Image: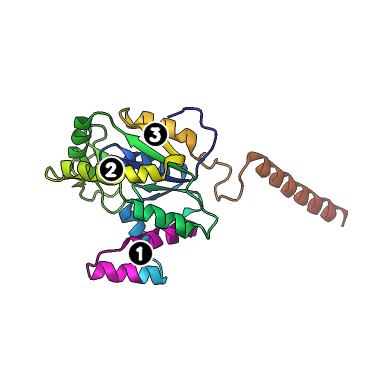
Amino acid sequence: MSTTPQHTYRHCIFLGQPGAGMSTAAHTLCKKIGMTYLSVSQLLEMVIEGDSQTAATVRSHLNSSKIITDQLFVQSIVEVIKSGKCRNGFILDGLPKNISQAKLLDEMLQNTNIRIDAVFNFRVSDEQLLINRMRNSLIHQTSGRIYDLSRKSPKHAGKDDETGQELCHRYTLQNTEKRLCLYKLFSEPLLKHYAHKLIQVDADKPITHVCKILLQYLPKPRPWYSPFGLLDTKTNWIRIMLAMLSIVTYIFINRTLL
């Protein structure tokens, strides 16, 4: 992965092997720079909060334990990323899941002004390292926060740092190798589909190093002088302050003359 990117990407997909660290990186980066983090659980939670037909259908499927089809799932993705919740950009964490979803996403985005800018593929060369990471991975289901016990333990064992709620294992011993096999099966056509947008990420490196490199590809955090998103540059802020000063001066002079 180049450390001198030529572009900034606001609409991103993170793909990679289970245990490669893409979820940890996506969540960390979104929190740092204000992009919207979209995992499966986060996405569905955002959708069912709405009052659209898609939201009603998803709620119905979840309540009746029906399988959510690729069509409905991708409709949910598009509905969320078109909403104001993603105005600062987004990272899709491991989404789309397969080539069918990827093609549907392209198709549904054609009538919008949103395009997927870049697809980051997290690669770990050592499969045993992946397995160890998976077995040491805990998750806070509600927020999607990830804890890799080999790199980042919670402050209190088994508890989420921010809420104090219970954490659970992301992968069981039984499904670790199965997940890796499924990834190999579905990833090849997906990566070929996104070949023209693909950026390879060396995920053997520590997560702090990976995030530092990725930050160069993503939007800069909103500066302190733009707390409400109304001002994009310091120059604009100075101009508005000067305009306000002129108005105050004008009012003061007129009152003095009267």
Residue at the left extreme of this rendering: 174
The residue indicated by pointer 2 is 146
Q: Which label belongs to residue 200? A: 3
> Reading the chain from its start, which is encountered first: label 2 or label 1?
1
Mark 3: give few (<14), some (14-19) or many (20+) Cα within 10 Å.
Answer: some
Left or right of 133 on screen, residue 42: right
Q: Which mark is residue 72?
A: 1
- Taking the image as shown, residue 203 lies to the left or right of residue 226, namely left
Q: Residue at x 22, y 34 (%)?
A: 130
Considering only vertical position in the picture, is 112 above or below 180? below
How far apart, in angstroms, are the residues tagged by discs 1 and 3?
29 Å
Q: Can I make out residue 170 in this image? A: yes
Residue 17: percent from the left, percent from the top?
A: 28, 39
Query: Residue placed at 30% from the left, 37% from the top?
Result: 21
Q: Is residue 80 magenta?
A: yes
Q: Position of residue 224 (x, y in %)?
A: 55, 41
Residue visible at 27% across and 29% down in the picture: 125
Tell me the CA gap for discs 3 and 2: 22 Å
Please, what is the three-letter code of the amino acid marked with disc 1? Leu
- Depth check, mark 2 against mark 1: the one in front is 1
Q: Which residues are magenta?
A: 57-84
Q: Name the foreground residue: 19 vs 103.
A: 103
Q: Is residue 27 visible?
A: no
Question: Looking at the image, which is closer to me, 250 or 89?
Answer: 89
What residue is at 26 percent from the left and 35 percent from the top? 152
- Please state the horizontal and vertical placement of residue 229, each as a whole percent of the image: 56, 50
- Is 98 one of the magenta-colored residues? no
Dot 1 or dot 3, earlier in sequence: 1
Q: Quadrant of residue 65?
A: bottom left
User: Disc 3 marks which amino acid?
Assistant: Gln
